[in-house]
Every structure is written in structure tokens, then in C-alpha cells.
Amino acid sequence: MRPEILTRSATMPVSLDEVKRHCRMRPGDTSEDAHLTLLLDSAVEVAESELNRSLVETAYLLKMTGFPELDEEGERPICLYRPPVVSVESVKYYNESNVLTTVSADDYQLDLSEDPRIIEGVDKDWPTDVHKKINSVEVRFTCNTVTVKSNIKLALCELVAGARKARGGVTPQDLKLMPHWFGIQRLLAAQVRHEL
């Protein structure tokens, strides 16, 4: 299940000035700032989707129906979304009395690796008194990439420049239909290969 975005930083991986320079706009020209900002937001969303990584600090709320079942490794992990995860604020659940209850941080471990997850603590189990309802478990966590590589910045600027030039739509789906999308995918793929 895809988590809900609670908050998202307004600080983008590239500045509006960097985008303007890439688009060869005159310094000080603010006539397209609102449109460029909209295009940049969509470009970041596309890049995050392609990379399965957060490029902007984002707080998420993941809702699940109950705690996970045992996996093949004998664990019951809660898999998180879009690394790098920088913090887990809380793990909560509705108990059988339908009261929202916080799981103590001492009762679970964080694995903030490339495939971030939360697992039960040593000699601990997830609570069993969970209410039998949809979205009975809630996990709040934050993701953020501290340093965005130059090829990602270039891909973002290219997405914005292409959309600006085409004067087309600004949704993430529209950006993926642009003629130079293949080249942008290569820039993003270079990031994935670089990190592996």
C-alpha cells in the first residue's frame, strides 16, 4: 500500500535559478516562475517514481490492516517507502477497544538500509490485540536525500526545459511522454547504477 504524504518540503533539489539558467532565460526574469515551479514539482515527482527514492524531505503516513504476517526469513517486517528513510516518528495501532495505541520504540528495530523496514525487536512480537478493521496500523516516517547527484539535477532541469519548450501538460504522466524522455531515463538510470 502506498503511504499518504503528510508534509513535503518546499526546498527542491535544484533551484529556480538553476532551472532558468538551464532554460537560457534572462537573469531576473520572473514572468514564468509559477509555471516553472509547477513543472519542477512534476519533474521531481517523476524522478522520485523512476528512482523509487525521495529527493525532497517528505513525511509519510503508512496505513495497514493489521501487522504483517511472517515472511520467509521468519520476520514480520513493515516495509517502508522511498528511501532514504531518515526517521520513524511512530508506530501506532488501534487495539481491540478501538483505542489508538503507540508501540514503544524499544519493541521494534529500524533497518534504514536501501530497503528500509521496521522489524520486531529481539524477543519481541508485534501486538496481537489489534482491532479487526481496515487501516488499524499507522506508521509515520520521514524520507530525505541529503545530497542529490549532478546527473539527477540535470535530469530535472531537462524535464522542466522540455515541458516548457513543448508548452504541454505538466502532470508527471505528461512529462514521460516528452520526446527526450529516453535520455532523461538514462540520466536517472546512471544514478541507480552508481549507487549499486
Image: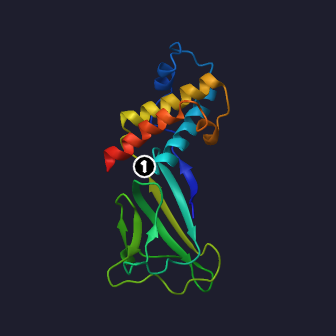
Residue found 47% across the figure and 19% down from its top: 21
Q: Quadrant of residue 6?
A: bottom right
Q: Is residue 37 visible?
A: yes
In the rendered image, residue 57, in percent from the top left (x then y), is placed at: 46, 47
Q: Residue furthest top?
A: 26
**Considering depth in this image, is 144 or 96 the residue closer to the camera?**
144
Q: Is residue 95 above or below residue 117?
A: below
Which corner quadrant holds the N terminus? bottom right
Residue found 32% across the figure and 51% down from its top: 196
Instruction: Left or right? Give the position of 30 relative to 194.
Output: right
**Considering depth in this image, is 71 or 34 the residue closer to the camera?**
71
* Mark 1 surroundings: few (<14), some (14-19) or many (≥20) residues within 10 A: many
Instruction: Left or right? Give the position of 45 relative to 153.
Output: right
**According to the image, label 1 marks what residue?**
144
In the rendered image, residue 48, in percent from the top left (x then y), is placed at: 49, 46
Disc 1 marks a residue whose amino acid type is Asn
Q: Is residue 105 above or below residue 10?
A: below
In the rendered image, residue 63, in percent from the top left (x then y), is placed at: 57, 68
Q: Is residue 12 visible?
A: no
Q: Quadrant of residue 107?
A: bottom left
- Find numbered disc 1 in the image and state the secondary structure of the residue it sits on: loop
**Considering depth in this image, is 20 or 29 the residue closer to the camera?**
20
